[in-house]
Image (spheres, rainbow, N blue to C red):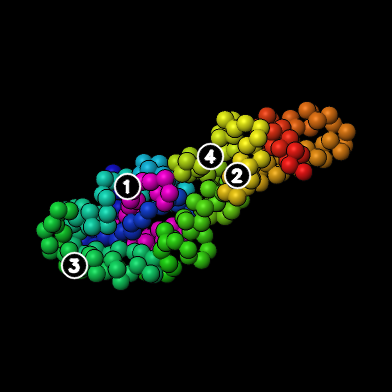
Amino acid sequence: MKLVEARGDDVTFTFGRFNPPTTGHEKLIDATKKIGGRNYRVYASHTQDSRRNPLDHKTKISYMKRMFRKHSSHIIDDAALTAIHVAVKLYDEGFKNLTMVVGSDRVRDFQKLLDDYNGVKARHGLYDFNTIKVKSAGERDPDAEGISGMSASKMRKAAQDNDYDSFAKGLPLGYRGGKRLFKDVQKQMKVKGFNEWADDLDEASIFQAIKIAGGKKIFKKEYEGALKLYKQFTKRGDKSAVAIHKAATSYRHVDTRQLQRYIDAIGSAR
């Protein structure tokens, strides 16, 4: 992809997993632009697995361009696998001075890495910049595990728990693709709903299955909410079948038949 920008000897970039992209990543990209001016690039990794990297590279880039629209033309769809590969590519483009922007906790690591390979021809190729600087974005790496505030790891946890409200806290204000992103992350993390695995259970096993679902927080909140609605509807005078249908259809992941089995199992356990 060609960028419309003032070309010079200096280039600034950032590289991350963006899995999924978050407000923390937005701050990282904003810092990259502030440091690099018009000559800045944003690269995403290609690593994919169901636990920590659910979105594939193409999907990530697509979401990033829509989520961070003001940076869209600087978000690069590229085959570079690592920050080292990015450095080689930028050197091949003719840049002489390289700056990388990272979370405050990664500055020392990346400075050493990029310095160690400067002028060294290896399997990744060769780069030989006049200067290499690694600068802090001012906050910790948004891809790091267990950091304060909203991080990609916390958003993945929210997707695993089917907690969209928590997931949405990590999205930029005004972004409208949150629910689609939420579903895509869940799909690639192989999050299974109650309906998907309860179909094969017999009546004797259903209550234990529900307890397992609750322990894993898989759609737990929706079934509990539907149960409360069911009780309200029957108390109001609705017939059981009508109340179940109305309660189930009030939630996206609740199935009428499974809600009936849920209610029956809870009743038989008392």
Range drawn in magenta: 24-53
- For the residues marked 3 and 1, what is the alpha-carbon distance in whole angstroms? 23 Å
Q: Is residue 248 above or below residue 109?
A: above
Tell me the quadrant of the picture where the C terminus can be found.
top right
Going from the N terminus, do you reach mark 4 or mark 3 first?
3
At horizontal 80% and vertical 30% (from top left) the residue drawn is: 240
10 Å neighbourhood of mark 2: few (<14), some, or many (≥20)?
A: some
Residue type indicated by callout 2 = Ala
- For the residues marked 2 and 3, what is the alpha-carbon distance in whole angstroms? 49 Å
- The residue carrying mark 3 is 116
Q: Is residue 101 above or below residue 123?
A: below
Q: Is residue 146 above or below residue 227?
A: below
- For the residues marked 1 and 2, what is the alpha-carbon distance in whole angstroms? 32 Å
Which of label 4 and label 3 is nearer to you?
Answer: 4
- The residue carrying mark 4 is 192
**Closest to the observer, 165 or 25:** 165
Which of label 2 and label 3 is nearer to you?
Answer: 2
